[in-house]
Image (spheres, rainbow, N blue to C red):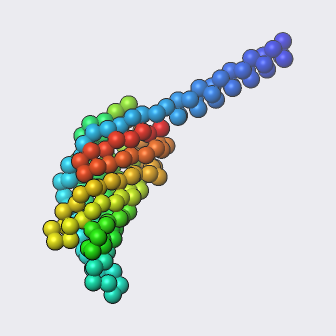
């Protein structure tokens, strides 16, 4: 009888572990739009002795998210701009506070890595592509991982 109980207990335990692992890796697709509501504070300076390379640091850049992610994000980032070619690349840390459909409420922080083309006369951006990776969260969003892809007005990604 004892051996039968041990076998049953073992089977139940393995089943619970497999079920919890399956629940933890469920993919959640998110997409929607975001609108910049505050450009924050930006300071730019020539990079080294170069007359055409700029380093710009931005703090307090705020966006309002709609769609599968509803809430507000604040990002601080640094970008390097080559005013001869227009090539821009940068990175930063973004923290979203709000709700993600199918997951819940909390904060989600990720690392932004982006590239774009910048017109150094007007500072207008084009060809903007941003990847958000290295997620960490709080509340219902704790433990999420995945990737978010951005254009100048939209986001799309898979979280798990």
Where is residue 130, by image quadrant?
Answer: bottom left
Residue at the farthest left position: 122
Q: Residue at x 24, y 70 (%)?
A: 42
Q: Residue at x 19, y 58 (%)?
A: 38
Decide: is 159 above or below 75. above
Residue sitting nearer the eye, 16 or 133: 133
Decide: is 26 above or below 56. above
Residue at the farthest bottom position: 49
Task: Residue 1: tell me if it is visible.
Answer: yes
Query: Which quadrant is home to the N terminus?
Result: top right
Q: Is residue 118 left or right of residue 78?
A: left
In this rendering, the count of numbered labels is 0
* Image coordinates for residue 26, horizontal then vertical, percent: 49, 31
Q: Residue at x 32, y 84 (%)?
A: 50
Where is residue 8, by image quadrant?
Answer: top right
Task: Residue 60: tell me if it is visible.
Answer: no
Q: Residue at x 25, y 51 (%)?
A: 152
Q: Is residue 47 left or right of residue 142?
A: left
């Amino acid at each position: 009888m004892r051996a039968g109980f041990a076998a049953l207990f073992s089977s139940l335990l393995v089943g619970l572990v497999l079920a919890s692992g399956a629940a933890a890796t469920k993919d959640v697709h998110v997409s929607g739009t975001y609108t910049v509501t505050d450009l924050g504070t930006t300071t730019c300076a020539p990079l080294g002795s170069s007359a055409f390379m700029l380093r710009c640091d931005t703090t307090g850049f705020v966006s309002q998210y709609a769609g599968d992610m509803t809430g507000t994000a604040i990002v601080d980032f640094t970008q390097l701009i080559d005013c001869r070619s227009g090539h821009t690349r940068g990175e930063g840390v973004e923290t979203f506070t709000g709700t993600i459909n199918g997951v819940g409420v909390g904060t989600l922080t990720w690392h932004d890595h982006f590239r774009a083309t910048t017109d150094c006369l007007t500072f207008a951006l084009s060809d903007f592509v941003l990847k958000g990776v290295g997620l960490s969260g709080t509340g219902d969003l704790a433990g999420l991982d995945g990737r978010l892809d951005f254009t100048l007005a939209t986001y799309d990604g898979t979280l798990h």
